[in-house]
Image (cartoon, rainbow, N blue to C red):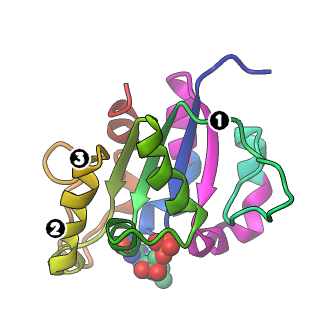
Amino acid sequence: MSSRRVLYLIACAAGPTRYVDEGVRVAQGVGWDVCLVLTPSAARWWEPRMRELAELTGHPVRSRYKLPWESDALPRAAAMLMAPMSCTTLNKWGAGIADTLAIGLPSEGVHLGVPVAAMPYFNQAQGAQPAVAVSVERLRAQGVRVLIGADGYPPHPPKQGNAKAFPWDRAVAALS
Ligand SMILES: Cc1cc2nc3c(=O)[nH]c(=O)nc-3n(C[C@H](O)[C@H](O)[C@H](O)COP(=O)(O)O)c2cc1C
């Protein structure tokens, strides 16, 4: 069994999730034992290559809540990083809606003393919705480190995102 600290890397259906294997490698490179959790929408993007992610992490990739009689598939997390966080998941989480495992784990975890960080990836038009600023404040008030703006990811102009250049290293570094 690994003695490395376990990180849940939680990814939504936002551009950089196409390259989430890079995020896994960055976190592994600084010593984390990474377990990957995807939203159901994000899991669709990786459906044909899900085995690659399981092999890379050495853990099953989770995207749904377990059934009541099933035991936990993942080891306990020492920290959780939601990256990239979609605009939709940010607003659901901010409103207290945990209808995906991807929200359920950090929304409870942060109140159980687990360090939780979240780096969004969406454009300025999505970010202009009044709900976004409210959700960011609500998460921060609960102790979530929301990495938006100058010290995280600043929303990009529409059609000008560069998902491949998502700063995984900055997101992972926020947990140290
Ligand atoms: C190809 C594609 C790319 C998308 N990229 C983003 C994105 O970068 N950021 C974002 O907030 N939403 C993006 N969306 C919209 C989200 O996928 C959508 O809001 C979805 O409901 C998010 O669900 P999730 O947060 O549960 O993964 C994209 C949708 C598609 C189809």
Q: Earlier in the sequence, mark 1 or mark 3?
A: 1
What numbered label is drawn on residue 143? none
Q: In what quadrant of the picture does the N terminus appear? A: top right
* Amino acid at pointer 2: Ala
Near mark 1 (Cα within 10 A), the count class, few <14, some 14-19 or many ≥20, is: few
Q: Which residue is mark 3?
A: 152
**Position of residue 162 measured from the top left corner of the image (x, y, whole percent):** 33, 62
Q: Picture quarter containing residue 159?
A: bottom left
* Amino acid at pointer 3: Gly
Relative height, residue 25 to residue 53 (above, below): above
Relative height, residue 52 to residue 133 (above, below): above
**Position of residue 104 measured from the top left corner of the image (x, y, whole percent):** 53, 60
Q: Residue furthest right?
A: 69
Q: Is residue 176 visible?
A: yes
Q: CA distance from mark 2 to mark 3?
A: 15 Å
In the displayed structure, does residue 125 sit left or right of residue 46? left
* Amino acid at pointer 1: Arg
- Which of the two discs, 2 and 3, sits closer to the camera? 2
**Position of residue 88 measured from the top left corner of the image (x, y, whole percent):** 38, 76
**Position of residue 78 measured from the top left corner of the image (x, y, whole percent):** 54, 30
| Circle 3 SS class | loop
Q: What residue is rendered at 47% in x and 39% in y? A: 112
Q: Which residue is mark 2?
A: 133
